Amino acid sequence: MASLTTSLGPLHLATPLIAASGTVGSVVEFANSIDFTLYGAAVAKSVAPEAWPGRAAPRIAPLGDGMINGIGIQNPGIDAWLDEVGPEIAAIPTQVWASAVAHEPDGFAEVAAKLEQAPITAVEVNLSCPNLDGAPFALDPVLSHDVVSRVRAATTKPIGAKLSPDAMPIAAVAAAVVDAGADWLTIGNTVMAAGIDVRTRRPTITGFIGGYSGTPIRPITVRCVIEVRRELPDTPILACGGVSHADHAIEYILAGADAVGLGSVHFAKPRAARGILSGIARYLDREGFSAVGELKGAYEPWN
Ligand SMILES: Cc1cc2nc3c(=O)[nH]c(=O)nc-3n(C[C@H](O)[C@H](O)[C@H](O)COP(=O)(O)O)c2cc1C
């Protein structure tokens, strides 16, 4: 059987599947319902320097063929997180990564510095968070560079920068965060969206504008991976957006991704990873690949 082990920059992964931030709680909360041995890593929900209360309900809802969320990154703050989640991490049978978030660049660095002694393998920097002016860091290469360089200075752990499909051009933000010291790029987060229920005439979620995820965003994120891969042929990429089937993960790897995130699929099918992983293995065997890494970027151009 073909090998499913892979790497993402300095990180060696048992499988190319990553449980995406915010879709498996703190990771330890899901230890009994998700088989984490099927994943190369699991990313905890983003955590800020201080507790954030999140938005009022409804803050998550089905919308079209996907879902919208405007949770407001509710989290207990890094000090409580370290007390409550930290001691449980060692029992998780895969790598656990933390995810840092803040409204100011120094806040990201504060979270990363406090995580230095935690039993996590890496820190993902969630740049899709509004700064003090209300716009996400991830849309601006200069601000994103500032955040990632401060996190780089605050930790010795590998760091990933999580980009937004809304950034235009996304390759400019990607180049900026790699220059600032990111070990890998996570492409990407949700796509900004909104909906109104015509029966109640209310916005779908209280925050009105939120993040769209699931099947409909996949072609957008595939486009992002292709654009970044063209500009940065050697940078490790974790692709994330709308994966619920082995073919979707394979598509991202063909586009140039090193690993693939599973996000919204966990809400409908918490055990989806098993079928996706065995589907990738079957494809590799059938198509004559001996390792998943051989598939990376192996799409056939038209000319
Ligand atoms: C309910 C929900 C909460 C999320 N929370 C976070 C978060 O805290 N930090 C983060 O970086 N991404 C968060 N995300 C984004 C996911 O990690 C993922 O990037 C996005 O949903 C796209 O993947 P998908 O289409 O497979 O869901 C969240 C997504 C959902 C649906």
Image (cartoon, rainbow, N blue to C red):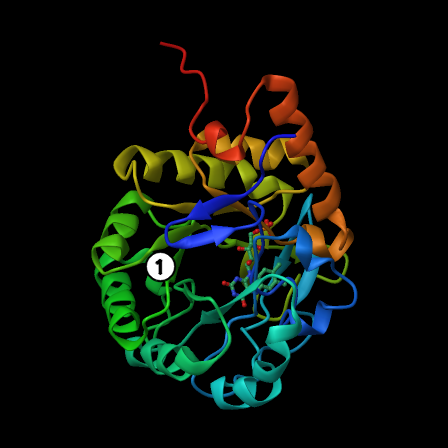
Give above or below for 153 relative to 143. below
Residue at horizontal 56 percent and vertical 69 percent from the top? 44
Residue labelled 1 has its Cβ within 8 Å of some atom of ligand 1:
no
The three-letter code of the residue at mark 1 reads: Ala
Quadrant where ligand 1 appears: bottom right
Instruction: State the quadrant of the N terminus.
Output: top right
Question: With 138 as the anchor, is 41 left or right in this view?
Answer: right
**Label 1: how many residues lie within 10 Å, few (<14), some (14-19) or many (20+)?**
many
Up-down: is 138 above or below 228? Answer: below
Q: Secondary structure at mark 1?
A: helix
Q: Can you give x and y, in whole percent of width and height, for residue 52 in the image?
A: 52, 84
Relative vertical location of residue 169 with respect to residue 198 in this rendering, above or below: above
Asked whether the viewer can see residue 238, the reply is no
Residue 254 visible here: yes
The image position of residue 71, as x and y in percent, is 59, 71
Residue placed under numbered mark 1 in the picture? 138
What residue is at 33 percent from the left and 40 percent from the top?
228
Q: Nearer the viewer, residue 284 or 195?
A: 284
